[in-house]
Image: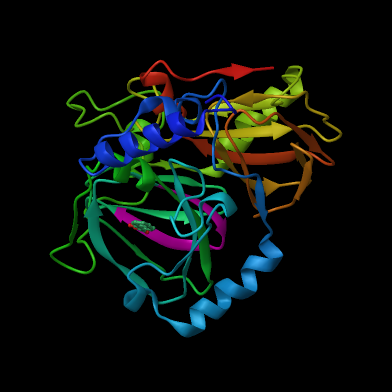
Amino acid sequence: MSAVLQPSVAAERKSFYDRIGRSNVTPLWEVLHGLITPTPNTPCKPYLWKWEQMWPWIQEAGRLITAKEAERRVLVLENPGLRGRSSITHSLYAGLQLILPGEVAPAHRHSQSALRFILLGRGAYTAVDGEKVTMSVGDFVITPSWTFHDHGNPSDEAMVWLDGLDVPLVELLDAQFMEKGPEETQETHFTQGDNLAQFGNTMKPVEYRARGRTSPLFWYPYDRTREALGVMAQGRDPHACWGHKLQYTNPVTGSWAMPTIGTFMQLLPGGFRGKEYRSTDSTVYAAVEGSGRCRVGDETLSFGPRDVFVCPAWLPYRLEADQDAVLFSFSDRPVQQALDLWREAF
Ligand code: 1HN
């Protein structure tokens, strides 16, 4: 509003706002410019969680509480601009989950979709609607909305993964439901490898009928993804912004692997100096191999294996690699694209 106002006009307006305010009415002109901004005005800040700092805290959590008692023993990665809201971006949740040898995390299901990206260990499993997969570092695993899931670690190593969920998005829509499973641990009825055999070979069982948009393939093992990126890097020039980047897909529809969360893996060749990039989907990155930097705003986030960092919506950033670096990432891009909202610029 204009800076100089006659005191009488200002007082009249104030009194008007107060009167209508008591009946839950408010003038748009006082808030319009903060509401509809020329470019995204996200509370999300760039941030880096270093594994070397997180790992002692994860181990400490392991001594303080069991997986069963906690239901899920997770340290939530809260964006500094969204403290107290269990959010790593405005629309997404992320946390680091620890499951120790011999532990189980009991079965439950919820409307929120979840992804697991394995950072440490091998041999723990997740069971999704009666199908079990054993996981290793770099694997991407999906728990579709409203499917029962429990985790267990029969191995002799601690396992840590990055959980990514659409919790804030589902909360915004007030569409959440949750229930505990009838048993702590699901009876599983397929052998390891069955899910990949059915859907992981550009084929599908003839009798398959989709139950939703989420990929029926729920385990994307790292060795296949890494091999694909390695072969691409041998024969092609990297993209100037993102190097060699693959998007995980639902093999039956060719669309996103998850309806609300887009997931990616990219390889930045050693010495890569990426050009500036921005997009409207705030993005969470987890480094798998190699080291490098993300230059975002006036900050430099130096990443190595198992570090997690966030690039907020529309803030330009550049990626750099020292040796070949592999980055997993996720964002709400499928939602924005479905609503014709997504933009990128480079
Ligand atoms: C959940 O179900 C898991 O199943 C992990 O491992 C983290 C965070 C919020 C809500 C549900 C899991 C979660 C979660």
Q: Is residue 291 left or right of residue 315?
A: right
- What residue do we see at 78% from left, 27% from top? 274
Q: Is residue 283 left or right of residue 234?
A: left
Depth check, front residue: 49 or 43: 43
Depth check, front residue: 5 or 242: 5
Instruction: Tell me: residue 171, above or below residue 126.
Output: above
Residue 115, image x and y in percent? 42, 46
Instruction: Tell me: residue 119, above or below residue 343.
Output: below
Q: Which quadrant of the frame does ligand 1 lie within?
A: bottom left
Instruction: Tell me: residue 203, above or below residue 100.
Output: above
Quarter assignment of residue 245 = top right
Depth check, front residue: 64 or 104: 64
- What residue do we see at 68% from left, 25% from top? 244
- What residue do we see at 41% from left, 28% from top? 201
Q: How does the figure colour the protein chain or chains?
A: rainbow
Image quarter of the C terminus: top right
Residue 317, image x and y in percent? 72, 32
In the rendered image, residue 124 lying in the magenta stretch gets the answer: yes
Instruction: Tell me: residue 62, above or below residue 211.
Output: below
The stretch in magenta equals 115-127
Residue 32, image x and y in percent? 44, 25
Quarter assignment of residue 280 = top right
Residue 85, image x and y in percent? 43, 55
Q: Is residue 19 left or right of residue 316?
A: left
In the rendered image, residue 329 lying in the magenta stretch gets the answer: no
Residue 249 can be seen, yes or no:
no
Q: Is residue 219 left or right of residue 38?
A: left
